[in-house]
Image: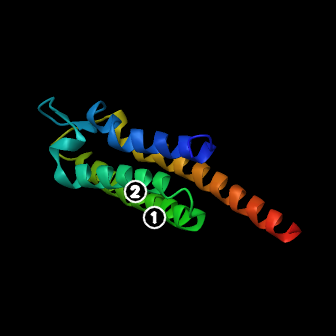
Amino acid sequence: MIQRIQTLYLLLAAGISGGLIFVFHLWTNAQDVQIFAQDDYLYLCLFLASALLSLISICSFKNRKSQFVMGRLNIILNFILLGIFVYQSLNLSGETNVSEKGIGILLPIFSIVCLVLANKAIKKDEDLVKSVDRLR
């Protein structure tokens, strides 16, 4: 389980979604207050759901098809999160509330990259097993 590269990618995605949200701020508002993901329950729930989905995907290593599907669902969840961040940042800029964007807005992009690499490795394993089954 741990020796597979997709497990490492999924652990990295879970660490990004579940751990780094408490370290990096999403944006700074007009009062110079840094807004973190735990300050808004929507962002916190979406990030933690992404981390939980990655961990469940790691635990289902024996069923590669469901692991692949969970990876795709996690990618979709991160795209939804990224879309909410883009909408929020476009809503804040240009108005009376001047905000400064933080590095936390880029966390879903890093998570998506890790999940795509994990799904690529899962697909590679599935193709390898199918080719071995053909030889039997």
Farthest residue to the right: give it: 135
From the viewer's perspective, is 50 left or right of 109?
Answer: left
Give the label, 1 or 2, closer to the camera: 2
Q: Are marks 1 and 2 in contact (CB under 8 Å)?
A: yes
Q: Residues within 10 Å of mark 1 (few under 14, many from 20)?
A: some
Q: Please tell me which residue lies in front, 94 or 59.
A: 59
Q: Amino acid at mark 2?
A: Leu
Residue 106 seen in this snapshot: no
Q: Earlier in the sequence, mark 1 or mark 2?
A: 2
The residue at the point 15 percent across, 35 percent down is 30
Q: How many marks?
A: 2
- The secondary element bearing badge 2 is classed as helix
Q: Position of residue 106 (x, y in %)?
A: 41, 41
Residue 6 seen in this snapshot: yes
- Judging by the rendered image, the residue that carries numbered circle 1 is 73
Q: Position of residue 111 (x, y in %)?
A: 46, 46
Q: Position of residue 8 (x, y in %)?
A: 55, 40
The residue at the point 41 percent across, 47 percent down is 108
- The secondary element bearing badge 1 is classed as helix
Q: Please tell me which residue lies in front, 64 or 124.
A: 64
Q: Residues within 10 Å of mark 2 (few under 14, many from 20)?
A: many
Q: Which mark is residue 133?
A: none
